[in-house]
Structures are given as C-alpha cells and as structure tokens.
C-alpha cells in the first residue's frame, strides 16, 4: 500500500489540485490527472514544445487533450455533476506508474453504471498513452463512446480568463482505423502528430465526428445489463517533426495496438521497476515520510525530459506555473538527486545549458558583459524568458515590474556549481572536456566582467537580486558574491588541473582562455568583497541589510499571510527574507565555513525567513540537521514531502513543486544521512530523526553503484557495482570500500 | 421572394461570414447566424454589456451561447462534417425577422435525417429567443437532444488565438423545468440570467448535464422512422440586474412557453410589419437595389439598442469588430435614417451621448480643454476607448500606435451636428431643452478652448486627424475646422434663439453659458482659419496636403490592395486619402458651398480616395448624384447595398457595416431623391438612376408622417399623418402640403 495514493470523492473545485498530484508523465509527455470523463482546460504537455506568448516571452504549449472520453448510455451523457455518484475514487500507483479511476453512478433514469479505468503514460515508449477502461450497465441499452482529440486547449495567461491558443490545426483525418490530427505551433517551430483509437473485442459500430473543437471516433454498441465490457484506448503523440508524420504516427499506433495492453503494461511496469531500483529510499520507522518522499521523487522522475531540447522545469510537465521555464531550481535543487541516482539523465540537463551557451553569450553581450550569462528563466531557446512586467488587472494597465531577469545573476554561478558537483560526484571527464569546461570558463569570464573595482572595498558586485527576492537592486549580496567567487575559482582550478592533459590544447583553443585571463580571475576572486561578519559571527545578507527594520517570525510558520498588512506591503524595507539566502550559500559552500559560524547565521536568519518560496525549507532543514535541530529539520522535511499532496502553498494546481522534491531528497541525503565527499572519499555523518530506525538508499559515486544504510550510530555501505575502491569516513573512523565489498562503521 | 435571402452549401470556412449576414437581433440581444448544430466561438451579444479588456479598454462581451443544439441518433452525433450532406440551406426572411435552416443528412450508418428549424430573436420581447425545430429520421431509433447554455464563450483579442472570457458563472441550476445560468462580468458591473428549455408534445425522458463548459438539458425519445417530431426551444436572456433574477427569468420563460410558438411568432411578425411600414423603400425597376437596401436596413434596425446604456455600434450586435465601440459612424452615417423613420429611437441614441456628457467633460479636462470632448471610440461608460496601441505579434512586442483617440477630434462637432439635424428634422423642442442644448453648448465650449490664435492665420486647430486617417498630426483639417466652426455657430444660434423663451433661464443656469462667452464663440467661428482655396476651386485637405506626392486611382476600384507596395507603405506621404474628407464636409455643410465648387473638389478628390473605409462611398455617391454622375453614384450604391452579402471588404465576419447601411439610405434619400429641408419646407431634387422607374419611401418631417414617391421628372408627396402644413419645393415650383393632403410637382 505504500506505493498507492488514493483520493476519493468528486469535487469539481478540487479537480485542478488532483490534476497536478495525479499527473502521469514520461518526461516527454505529461497528462494531468483530471478525470477523463469531464472536460478540463488541461490538454497534453509535450516537453520542449513552446510558443511565443504575451508577456512571458515563450511558454510551454497546452497541446490537445487526448485522454478525454465522453460516454452516453441510452442517449444520456454520463457526466459526474448531474447523476448520483455512488463511488468516485482515483488511485495513483507510483510503483507501476498508473492512475486508476473508479466511477459508479446511478443515472437520473435509475441505471447503474460502473466504470473503471487504468491510465498509463508509457515509460519506454515516449509517444504512447494508454487508457484501458471497463464498463458495466445495470440494464441492456445503447452505449456511445466518443473518443476525441480535443483541439481547443489553450494556455491561461496572466489571468485565467485570458486564454492563448498556441497552435493551428494543419490536418485532420478520420477513417475506420483511427483519428489523426496534425498541429503546428503558431510560431511555426513545432509540429505535433496525434493519433488515437479505441480497441474493443466487442461488436460495435464506429463513426466519426469532426468540428472546430475536436475530432473523434464514436463507438456505439448495444450492451447487456450486468455484463462487463472492456476497451483500450491507444494514443500516440509525436513531435518528431515534419516529413510524413501521419504515416509514422499511425504506424506507431498500429504497432501499439498489435502489441496489446498486457504486454505494453508489463514493459511499462518494468521501466518503473528499474527507476525504483535506483531511486527508492527506504525509511524504516516512518512510513509517512517514506511515502511522501517516494511520491515526490515519482513526480520528479516523471518530469525529466528525454532530450536536450529542454531541461527540467520549475513545475514539471504538471502545469503552467512559471510557464514551463527552467530556473536555478533545476541545477541547485533537483539535479543532485539525478546526479546521484541517474547521472546520465543529470548530464543531459547540463548539456541543455551547454546547448544554450550561445544564447547565454548573446545575453551577456546584450547586458554589456563578457562570457556567458545564463538567463534567470530559460525556455526552449535559452534566451532570457523572465517577464519584465506582468499585468495585475485585465486591461494590463496596472503591472508589476519584475527585476529578476535583469538582476538575479547568481543563476550563472549556480550552473557552474552544478557542473562541478556533477563532475565531483561522477568523475565524468568526457563531459567536462566536451561541455563542462566551456561552461565553467565562460561563466567565470562573465563574473570577471560583472565586477567593479572599488578603491575601498575591492571587487564589488552591484545591483543584484539574491535568492531572497524581497530585496532588489542590492549591492554585494552574500550569496551572489560567494557563488561568483566560487565560479571564478572553479575557472582557475579547472584550468590549472587541465594543464598538461592530452586534450587540453584543443579545449583551450575552442574556449580561447589564457593564463593571463585566469590569473585575473584569481585576483578578482581573492579581492572580491564580502559583506563583513559581525562580532557575533552573522554575515550581512547584502550591503545595508542590518540597517533595515527588524521583524521576526515563528520558524514553524509559513508564507506571508501571517504578516501584518503594513509589513507585507513593505517587505523590502524589513529584514524579513523570502527564502534561505546566506544559509543557502553556507550549505552549498559548507567547506568555507565552520559549523559554529553556520549555526550563528542559522539562528539569525531562520526567524527572519517567511519561506514564501518553496525552495527555502529544504536548505534550512539540511543545515538544521547538521546543527542537531532535528525537530525543525523533520518538520520541514514532512512539509516538503507533502507540499503538493496537502497543497501547502495553495498553488498546487499550477504544477508540482519539483525544486522541493529534489530538495527533499537532499535533506535526506545531505542532511539526515550527512553524506559529503572529497575526491574519492565519502563522508557520512548521520543525523536521523529520532523516530526513524534506518534509512536505506542507493546512489552512484564516481562510477560505483553503492547502497547506503544509515541507522542511529551505524553506517553500512556496500558497493553493488564498481571497480575502484572508495574511501569511507564516519564517526571519525575511516575505511576503504572495495568493489563488491561492504563497510560498517560505528562510533 | 424579395424579402428572403437564401444561402446554400455547408462550408465551415464560410460560416463566419454567414454568421454575420444571418444575424438576428432585437437591439437588446444579438445572435449570429452560425448553424445551431455545430460549435462556434460566437455566443450571444447583449447590448450594453461590456467588460475591461486588454488593449481595447472595454469591449462588448461574448456572452454564453444559447442557440446551440447537439443531436444524436442511435448514439451517433449528427454533426455536419462527417456525414453526407444532402441539403444545407439557410434562409433569412427580413420581412418576418426569421432565420430558417434545412439540413438533410445521410449518416455513416445510412440513416437519413431531415432537420428544419426557425430561429427568432423576438422583436417585442427583448429577452426572448426561440428556436422551433422539426426532425424526421428514416428509421426507428433513439434520438438525443442536448440543449446547452454554453459557458465557455470568449472574445477574440488582438489575435484570434488569444481569447478573453469576460464572465464568471455565479449560479447554475437544472431541474425538470429548465436550465438556468447566472453570469457576472469580471468587472462586476453586469449580471445576466439565462434560462432555456425545450418543449415538445412527444413523449420523452429528460435529464441534465453540467460541467465546466455547459449546463444543458438532455431529451431522449424513441422516434418512429418517417415521422416528424417538433420541438420548441425557448431561451430568456435578461441583464436586468441582481435581485431575484432567477425567479424573474424563469417566470418569463414560463410565460413564453405558455404563450406558445404560434402566438409569439405572430407578435414578432407584427413587430417587423410595423418596422417595415416605416422603413421599407420601394424601388421600382431594380429589385436588386431594393433587396440590397432592405437587407442593409434590416441589419441596421436589428442593431439599434433599446435603452440609453449604449448607442448603435460600428459593427452592430453582429460581431466583435471595433469591440462594440460607438464612433461618429452612428451620428453621421446611421442616425439620419432613424431620425427620419423612427425619431424616438434616434433620440435615444443622442440621449446616450447626453448621458455621457460628464465623461466627455472629464475627457476634455484630461486633455487640457474645456467643455465636453466626446471620445473617438465610446463604450458603455463614455470614456475614451480607443486603444493607443495594438500589438502586431503574439508577444505584444511589436505594436502599432493608434492616434485617433488622441487626435480625431471632429467627433465632438459631429455629435453637435447630429443634435441639430435631429432638431431640424423633428422639431423636438423638449429634447433640445432637456438634452440637446447642453450638448451643443458644451461642445462649442470645447472648440473655443481647442483653437489657438495665430497672428498670421487667425484661429487655427493643430495636430488633428480628419476623416482621412492616412494623415496624422495635421494642422487645419478642412473637415475638422469647418465642423468646429459649425459647432461654434450652432452654439451661437441656439443661444440666441433660446433667449426670451420661458425655459431659457433654467437651461442657461444649468449650463452656465454667458452672452460674453457666446460672443467669443462667434468671434472664433468667424476668425477660424480654413486652408485656402486654389484658383481651380479645390480646397486643401489640411495645411501642406498639396505638397505631398501625388498619386491617383481608379474611382471604380476599392481598397489599398491595388496600390504598389511602396505607396501602400507610405500612404501618409501621398495625397491618397482613405475616405471622403473635404467632400464629407461639403456634403454635411452643403449650404456653405455652391455646386460648382463641390464639383471641382469632387473631381479632385475622387481619384485620390482609396475607399479603404466603408464610410467613404456613401458620401461620394450622394455628391456624385447631385453632380449628375449617376453611373458612379449607382455603382457605389450597389457596392454599399451588397457590402456584407458579398463580403466586399473581406471583413464581414467581424460584424455588419452599419455606417454603410445608414449611408446607403442617405444616398437614396439625400442623393437620388435629393431631399433637403429648411425650417418647415422640404425640397426635393430627384436624381434617380436611369433604370429606376420610381422610389417610394416614408419619413417623418417635423412631426408629420409623409410618403414620398419620386420618379424621373415627378415628385409625389402625401401627408399620411400630421396636423401642420408643410412647404414643398421641387423643379423650381413650390406648393403647400396640407394635413391629409398630397402634392404632385413636375418640371
């Protein structure tokens, strides 16, 4: 049962929240969980398919809906709002990647209808969606099934009442075999072919319907009362391109039908079994925590794109929140999980950044800088996609000015950080040579052009926004300056380590970096100004922060709703911060600080953080667990684990909080298990919540596949696959883990 | 047959054009002509119901669709795109105000379905829409009828792919009796209640369906092959307000059902009979002309609002062209027809302007002027509703700047002109006292503040746009300056004529106008600069016009498509003009010019006019007929008469060209019949097209109801109703028309 999440009771108002938490996806396609028997504005998400949009630059396209079904019995539509619902249940099985639905109705005419369906977005066949459904009526009668491709989906814009249709219909075809639609995004960049057909062994008649809203096939059959009828709906959605798309799509549909539900289902379950072999985390003594974590990782994995056209987005394939844009969420919060469990997937997300280096170079140039400046929000083309303003009213007359695109520069250092982290975890030198070095050098180059030399302070970075977005246009953000320094130092160290390697000359020539330039990076890094530390060890978040009005909050609270209005309206004038900022830097660059200093900063900032961003709690929880504040760490862990199941931020309808899901895994891995590493050595410093008996998880480390089991006072580590010995440290002891071997360390 | 317009052949692409030309309306409600059996984006137009919109300030709301029907036979949807269509015909009967539809299908399963419907938007009951339909199937089977209120209608924005939903659904209710929906515009200003129900004498079962898209009742019945079944769908749409709207709307629906189709139909036909008693124009010898004119007047009458909340809009209740805004089209082009045939209706449209005087005063103040400045585009609140810019691309990055709202100031003089014209035609002193004088004085006051004194030229009016919108920011527009002068002189003359009347003191006090101020108006009017007349008698359209690049076009051509690209892209640098401008002034102020001068100006400008505005041809046709150029006058008349039936401008889908319809009547009345008037005397100077034998029409003149019959060389005029004698002049002769009498004049 720990794999299954069951929700019952039909409520039209809650469908949009269900829709997110019951989403199925395979990285390429996303289908939200709204029940197939009712209309919804949500269609299909196709990773990488974007289009120009008002205000938001480009946004992920709400492609035609393909899972819908319209049923009628004896001419009466079987919708959920006007008949008596005897049962309405949905069950997401995260082990198998399926969504089941049970609907039992008594119609106004007194007929009882039992409906049951299983929905799959196929793990191995990225274009395939399957819906198997079974139906039983209490009386003989005429059953009509309309299987539509719904062509009137549109994206909600800055208001939900403003809808943008992002595609034109290029071709519609319906014949006995299937219905087919070819759509094209309005900008002309993407073509999508969709074919859909229902298979049933039962005798039936087949017709079609076509209008401006949909193309569909219509099955009619006379059913016997009390008898169960089974149908399998196959849908192929392909965005491969032009050519003879119709033939290709219909061929794929035919193949799927020939293969049949059972075999496709097995394939799909097999796919998820492999995922869970890698990703499952066992938490002995706390099933709620284990389930919440697994649920989060399920949605994280589902959202991971299958090619380098796009990276993991802030809200996944689940919704339109943040328009399908990619933020630092991906590199800093989500990727470490993938680096550790599916490094080849993590690599691809970094290659997405590499593929967009030219856009980042152009972006730097546009802003008067050198090197590569990654956009704060990134869509399919890698250009800055942050809306400079967003309307607050229907007319667009009142707008809010958004400065993150112009000022939240730390993203560039965050990406370099992730490249380095990936390399340190995987030792993937080929990636570093082909992609990573160029990212590191070009981003270091950006920072060298971004700083200004101040006679009194040294190198300063002015007019930025740090992770704490309440404070705009600030100078010398602690987080930004430190991450920039780290980025510059990465440039220096990777350059120096590369010297003398056989491939070095070729790489250097491509990037065009010189010893003199690198020397300057070092000089800037060493001269980079940091806001001074107070006597009590607390760092100032940015120049002038301590002079702001002080205000503190309960660390167990959440969001801005709890603040008095005058504070809420003037956040920028207070010391309140939106999310972990100084602490985020101290987490990411923990070796640069001692734990005592981190503790002092933690105590100061934790009571000044609203956690209005869902990125905040993971970082604080990790650091809290290092500091032994397990009560707070556990509280945050559980909030993060149920962020969308409990709709904690109230915006689950907009998509899944993937940064939180990735952060949740990091709380466990970096916080509770206390995993750290240097070179080929792993260090494990467990800080398990009291009620937990043990945690067991698997991860890759420098090419070896390891299983770690952590108990209170015991670290158990096995090398399941791998050929090189690894150093292990725990409780002050050291050991060497041999290929195929295991190590147990106790205090 | 001359009352009936029949269109055949189903073409999804042409439905949007059919939709406009087959629109039914009663001034309050508008229902486009798209066939009820297929989906469409068009819902219901409710006069005066507007909402805030991106870019366009406020726009008329696309309210829920109420005429749709979804039919199924034996579980198979009866849509038009996937079955064999044996017959598809629509017939608009303008005599009775009905739209009939015949659809005969052979379904994929080989069943023949005959469908016939009659649609009415009731003339006397402004909230009532009726659809009677009859159905026959060639086989026994199960018929399903879904009667929905479709709640997902939205307005297309600056691109058709951007849709704006302007209402929220406040209440939905379905019981055995009817389905009911209560919607509210997003700005909260308007509430609309809708109830809908199908009546049939045949035994059936009734159910309901409700989801995010619609609420509907579902009728199912077993029909016998070959037998005809009749249904009547009643819909009540009321925007009266809050209170217990549901009870009121359902009561009205119940009353309608009780009354039954036949009686309601008779009432409706009776309503249209009265309209045509007033409005019909008989053209002997040219049925095409008569039909085209009647068709145009039918749509003009249908669009006339029933209360002062809104005036006649540019494209009527037919579509979203110009967002349902009111322009000078109304006062100058459309209202004269109503002043002459339904003066009480014309009055109401002028009262709309009066009701918005405060907004016009605020507008003047905002722009730094005094008095009242009417907005170029006016919506429900009388504020300036012209979009200052409209996006050219999806992102809104590229925009076109629109200056008409800031510069096309002649609208203010046009409204004063219409007030005076109305008074001269009707003698309605009560209107002048209550409303008209205040409009005239406040607009004169505006012009007095709008002029600037130039040492060399006298009073000048700078930076305007005249009717010819190709030329922006021009100084001393001939049309604008003349109309301003006329407005100032109206102020003077109405002031002086009012002096000494019993009501004068009260009116003067309300408006606060003084002798001194009026003296100044006279001084300005007399000193107002006009672009100088050339030796050949041609007036310059504005300062510097003659210095522009010359370019001429064929007067029988139309639009900008025929111009070379470099000319088309640089229209403002040429002498090409968009529409009648100097000639429009000379038409409106004909007594200020001799015919020879008008002729010289006509010759000059006619070959420099593209007629890219549909307002252009009527004016030129009138003047052409005065000048004896009957070939051109007739050509324009016929183009105007078929402007939408033949989709001459290619934008009929956006709504009916109401200014052209009103202008068409003026060609006939002022041009071909040559009707003019001064005080209590009518002057008739016929210029009939050669093939026409006679024209017979009726109109009010100073309270008398007259019938005029004009032949080549004969004017016949009867007083059908009236108590005061009227002077008549024709062919140089004069006569007095006595109450109940008639006069015949010949050369």
Image: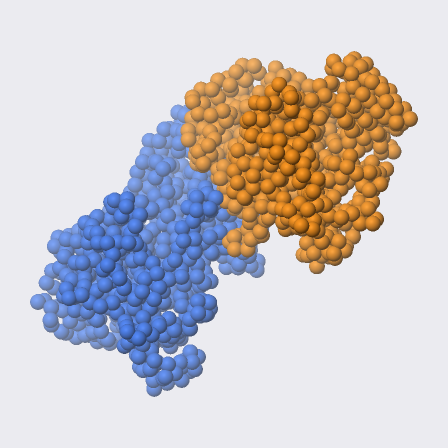
Chain colours: A orange, B blue
Residue under the image location 81 percent in, 17 percent down = A737
Residue under the image location 49 percent in, 39 percent down = A52
| Quarter occupied by residue B685 | bottom left
Q: Quadrant of the C terminus of chain A?
A: top right
Report x, y in % for residue B278: 28, 61
Report x, y in % for residue B130: 42, 48
A580 with respect to B599 (left or right):
right
Q: Is residue B723 above or below residue A138?
A: below
Q: Quadrant of the N terminus of chain A?
A: top right
Residue under the image location 69 percent in, 22 percent down = A427
B395 with respect to A20 (left or right):
left
Residue under the image location 18 percent in, 65 percent down = B534
Q: Residue furthest left?
A: B747
Residue A283 visible somewhere in the drawing: no
Residue B732 visible somewhere in the drawing: yes
| Quarter occupied by residue A170 | top left
| Quarter occupied by residue A417 | top right
Count of numbered circles on the image? 0
Query: Which residue is nearer to you in this view: B623 or B210?
Result: B623
Query: Which residue is nearer to you in this view: A566 or A351?
Result: A351
Report x, y in % for residue B6: 29, 43
Report x, y in % for residue A316: 62, 34
């Amino acid at each position: 049962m720990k794999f299954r999440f069951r929700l019952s009771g039909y409520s039209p108002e809650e469908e949009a929240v269900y829709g997110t938490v019951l989403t199925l996806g395979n990285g390429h396609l996303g289908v939200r969980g709204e029940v197939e028997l009712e209309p919804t504005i949500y269609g299909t998400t196709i990773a990488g398919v974007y289009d120009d949009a008002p205000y938001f630059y480009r946004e992920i396209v709400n492609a035609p809906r393909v899972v819908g079904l319209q049923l009628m019995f004896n001419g009466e539509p079987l919708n959920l709002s006007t008949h008596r619902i005897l049962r309405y249940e949905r069950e997401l099985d995260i082990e198998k990647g399926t969504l089941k639905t049970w609907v039992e109705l008594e119609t106004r005419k007194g007929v009882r209808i039992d409906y049951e369906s299983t929905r799959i977005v196929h793990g191995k066949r990225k274009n395939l969606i399957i819906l198997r459904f079974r139906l039983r009526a209490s009386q003989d009668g005429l059953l009509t099934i309309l299987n539509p491709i719904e062509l009137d989906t549109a994206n909600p814009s800055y208001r939900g009442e403003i809808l943008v249709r992002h595609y034109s219909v290029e071709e519609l075809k319906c014949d006995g075999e299937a219905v087919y639609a070819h759509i094209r995004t309005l900008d002309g960049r993407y073509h999508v072919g969709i074919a859909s057909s229902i298979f049933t062994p039962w005798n039936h008649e087949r017709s079609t319907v076509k209008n401006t809203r949909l193309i569909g096939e219509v099955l009619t059959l006379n059913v016997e009362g009390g008898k169960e009828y089974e149908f399998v709906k196959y849908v192929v959605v392909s965005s491969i391109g032009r050519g003879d798309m119709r033939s290709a799509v219909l061929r794929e549909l035919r193949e799927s039908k020939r293969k049949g539900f059972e075999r496709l289902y097995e394939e799909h379950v097999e796919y998820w079994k492999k995922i869970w072999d890698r990703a499952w985390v066992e938490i002995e003594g706390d099933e709620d925590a284990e389930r919440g974590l697994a649920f989060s990782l399920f949605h994280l994995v589902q959202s991971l794109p299958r090619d380098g056209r796009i990276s993991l987005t802030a809200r996944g394939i689940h919704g339109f929140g943040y328009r399908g844009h990619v933020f630092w969420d991906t590199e800093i919060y989500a990727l470490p999980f993938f680096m550790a469990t599916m490094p080849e997937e993590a690599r691809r997300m970094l290659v997405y950044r590499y593929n967009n280096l030219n856009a980042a170079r152009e972006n730097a140039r546009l802003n008067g800088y050198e090197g590569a400046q990654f956009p704060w929000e990134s869509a399919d083309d890698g250009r800055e996609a942050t809306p400079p303003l967003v309307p607050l009213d229907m007319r667009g007359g009142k707008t809010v000015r958004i400065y993150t695109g112009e000022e939240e520069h730390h993203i560039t250092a965050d990406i370099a950080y992730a490249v380095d982290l990936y390399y340190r975890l995987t030792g993937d030198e080929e990636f570093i040579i082909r992609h990573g070095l160029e990212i590191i050098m070009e981003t270091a180059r950006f920072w060298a052009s971004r700083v200004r030399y101040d006679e009194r302070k040294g190198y300063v970075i002015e007019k930025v926004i740090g992770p704490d977005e309440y404070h705009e246009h600030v100078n010398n953000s602690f987080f930004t300056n430190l991450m920039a320094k780290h980025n510059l130092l990465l440039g220096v160290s990777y350059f120096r380590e590369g010297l003398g390697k056989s491939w070095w000359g070729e790489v250097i020539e491509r990037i065009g970096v010189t010893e003199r330039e690198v020397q300057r990076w070092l000089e800037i890094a060493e001269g980079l100004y940091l806001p001074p530390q107070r006597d009590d060890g607390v760092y100032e978040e940015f120049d002038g922060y301590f002079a702001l009005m002080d205000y503190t909050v309960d660390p167990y609270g959440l969001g801005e709703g709890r603040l008095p209005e005058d504070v809420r309206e003037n956040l920028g004038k207070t010391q309140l911060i939106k999310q972990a900022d100084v602490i985020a830097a101290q987490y990411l660059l923990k070796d640069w600080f001692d734990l005592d200093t981190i503790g002092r900063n933690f105590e100061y900032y934790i009571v000044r953080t609203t956690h209005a961003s869902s990125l905040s709690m993971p970082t604080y929880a990790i650091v809290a667990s290092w500091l032994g504040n397990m009560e707070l760490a556990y509280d945050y862990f559980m909030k993060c684990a149920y962020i969308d199941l409990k709709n904690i931020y109230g915006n689950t309808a907009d998509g899944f909080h993937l940064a939180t899901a990735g952060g949740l895994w990091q709380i466990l891995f970096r916080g509770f298990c206390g995993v750290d590493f240097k070179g080929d050595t792993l260090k494990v410093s467990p800080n398990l919540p009291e009620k937990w008996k043990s945690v067991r998880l698997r991860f890759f480390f420098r090419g070896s596949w390891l299983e770690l089991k952590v108990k209170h006072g015991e670290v158990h580590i096995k090398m399941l696959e791998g050929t090189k010995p690894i150093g292990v440290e725990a409780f002050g002891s050291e050991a060497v883990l041999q290929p195929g071997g295991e190590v147990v360390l106790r205090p």
